[in-house]
Amino acid sequence: MSDILSTAGKPEVVAGIIVLALNAYVLMGGADYGGGVWDLFASGPRRDAQRELIANTIAPIWEANHVWLIVVVVMLFTGFPAAFATVGIVMHVPLTLMLLGIVLRGSSFVFRSYGSQTGPSRRWWGTTFAIASVITPVLLGDVIGAITSGAVGFASNRISTASFASVYIEPWLAAFPLSVGAFALALFAFLAAVYLAHAAHDAELQEDFRKRALVMASAVLVTATVAMLLSSSAAPRVMEGVMFSGWGILIHVATGTSAVTAIVMLWKRNYAIARYAAAAQVSCIVWGWAFSQYPYVIPTTLTIHDSAAPEITLDLLLTGLGVGALVLIPSLWYLFRTFTARRRLTR
Amino acid sequence: MSDLLAARTQMALSLGFHIIFAEIGIAMPLLMVLAEWRWRRTNDEVYLHLAKRWAKGTAILFAIGAVSGTVLSFELGLLWPGFMGFAGPIIGIPFSLEGFAFFTEAIFLGIYLYGWERISARAHLAAGLIVAASGAASAIFVVMVNAWMNTPTGLTQSHGTLTGVDPISGMLNPSSFQQCIHMVLAAYAATGLAVAGLHAGILVWKRPSAFHKHALTLALLVGAPAAVLQPISGDVSARVVALWQPIKLAALEGQFETERGAPLRIGGLPNVDEGRTRGAIEIPHGLSLLAYHEFNSEVRGLASFPRALWPPVAVVHVAFQVMVALGSMMALVGLWSLVVLWRQHTTANSRRLLIALAIVTPFGFIATEAGWTVTEVGRQPWVIQGILKTSDAVTPMPGLVVPMTLFAVLYAVLAAIVVVLMRGLVRETQ
């Protein structure tokens, strides 16, 4: 980490802000996808109540949460246009599938909320919403895994020479990227279960989501272990960075501490703290991944410095982000305060 | 179908789909805020009912706009990596600003839709106003990018790579101002008159009610002035095109030969092999007058440009004719509505006007698609006028007809569902 700090210039700052936006997307948008997962696996006597809680929790905020992804994409092509172009070419297939998932998830959610409230169409939208909520995070994780493994960078150098499959399919349809996809899904479902346990008013509903959160905590552990084991051959840089470097150990300790805190607090039914611990755990994972990629945007072909936009663009982007944050942060605070406050205005 | 054509078709479908929802997302919030404001001023419950109805429609259409916009942000890289790798440092800045405007819009729309009983009356109205303003701001930033593709400024390059960029100058390119005005007016005119037309139709052919009368008046207050102003903005647009993209002007007017005192052609079909436009009504000196405001000014014809740089002339010309014809009718009906509104304080008693309004319901959206075709197809073969060819920007991935088909099916299904849902919403009010 010390070498990052000593050489950090504007490109590193922009890259850091992109990771921050991705982190926000994972904590907010990711949890909304996780909500869809629990809609799919709604079960038991309180099945409908579970679905209703999920819908009511997501409805006012999912569109704002979703914008974080657009912010990530736009900052990526502004700050690192060559990296964006490379990902666009090599990851065409999984990204297209992910887009289908995004469109189906969002549109089926509003169709279910605003369409006919009875009859088969409502169930049909519910199913589409839930299935798209499962598939999309897997593809998002898969794309990140493929980039991290170096397969995207490798394929981008062979676009005109290698076969279709080895450039456009094999980089993402491989064990390691798919394991990262499963890991992302587990993380999102875990976050959602913890948030929902906190949001539920009813003690029985709280128990439903507490159980789900605890199950998912172990699923996170299992998928993380699988991804780690696979990374030793598929993505040795990650393995090396996360396991053996100084900052890697630091992040490991932080991740472990917050994971244990989250589980203990879930066990003790202290959902307010469990929520923050789970968010901290997931954030540590996002940053651990980001640092393992350093100094590359696309390992191992495009570094942050090589692919950064001209300085004037970075200056304007950072200025815009500063001004934008002044508007955005109070607005987001207001949004969440409005919909988490238990009190209602009486009219 | 070639990969390039498949990529262009997919992009055209995506933009053509998104632009409708984007327009509605700009104008509907204004309508719902107006209705709520009237309710709070008059205590007339009909206005509250109207505001909630419109808010419900906005919620559905905004969500579709948001997800289809996400598709576009990715498609820039999936289909046009050559364009993004080259132009990202310039167009990224207006796109970033658009990102913030859109973020603000999404946040306050959530607050508006679900906050009726959670925040004060004043805060709720303010949230709606913020949604309306940030929607318009989003449109302006996105259209700045398109304007830059038409008249790129703020860059120096050698051999296909940028050597210097100035994103601010890029944003303030010669087409920006007029294109932004034209797009925002289009959003208000198309959406306002479409909503007015729906309610006018119900007033004429179904049961008239205070609900529909109020709705009609408010929708006209947004749509009619915009429709009346749009031809003026169109005139300015055409003059900027004449100055900066003479080949696009020649294509959209079907002007093959360079000519002093060129006529304005209404209708007709350009034939590129014969080098003339057949079947048009020609108004002598009309084009010279409109394009340069001088009777005998010279208009460059397509023949003065290399054939390889011609856009598809017939498509551009016909699209332009459609846009101008529909826009003119909207302006006339808009003006008529404003006169009646001024005199009678309502348009609900003039049956003929109501029928005219019902007829123009879809015109704005068709004109928008036509106008978008003019600006995009009229710029071909360039993606950035004079700098980067569309064929050099496309992804090297083969088989693009597959994603194109996928998205075509997806958009067709979504459009059908939205129409069914909207019909349901309108029916509930009768």
Image (tube, coloured by chain):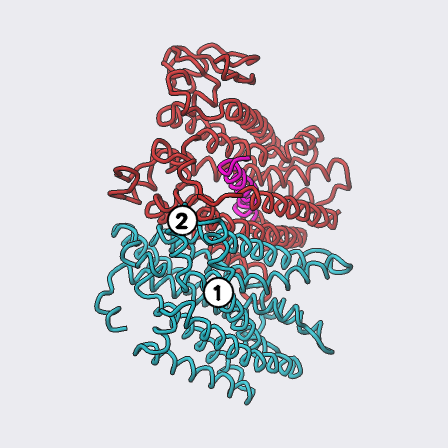
Chain colours: A cyan, B red
The three-letter code of the residue at mark 1 reads Pro
The quadrant in which the N terminus of chain B is found is top right
Q: Which residues are magenta?
A: B1-28
B362 to the left or right of B250: right
B24 to the left or right of A278: right
Q: Position of residue B185 (x, y in %)?
A: 49, 37
Residue receiving disc 1:
A177
Q: Position of residue A24 (x, y in %)?
A: 44, 66
Q: Quadrant of residue A322?
A: bottom left
> Is A132 part of what is drawn in magenta?
no
In the figure, A293 relative to A247: above or below?
Answer: above
The three-letter code of the residue at mark 2 reads Phe
In the foreground, B311 or A205: B311
In the figure, B59 relative to A41: above or below?
Answer: above
Q: Mark 1 and mark 2: span between their CA atoms? A: 30 Å
Q: Residue at x 68, y 40 (%)?
A: B199
Residue receiving disc 2:
B95
User: Tags 1 and 2 in contact by the CB under 8 Å rule?
Assistant: no
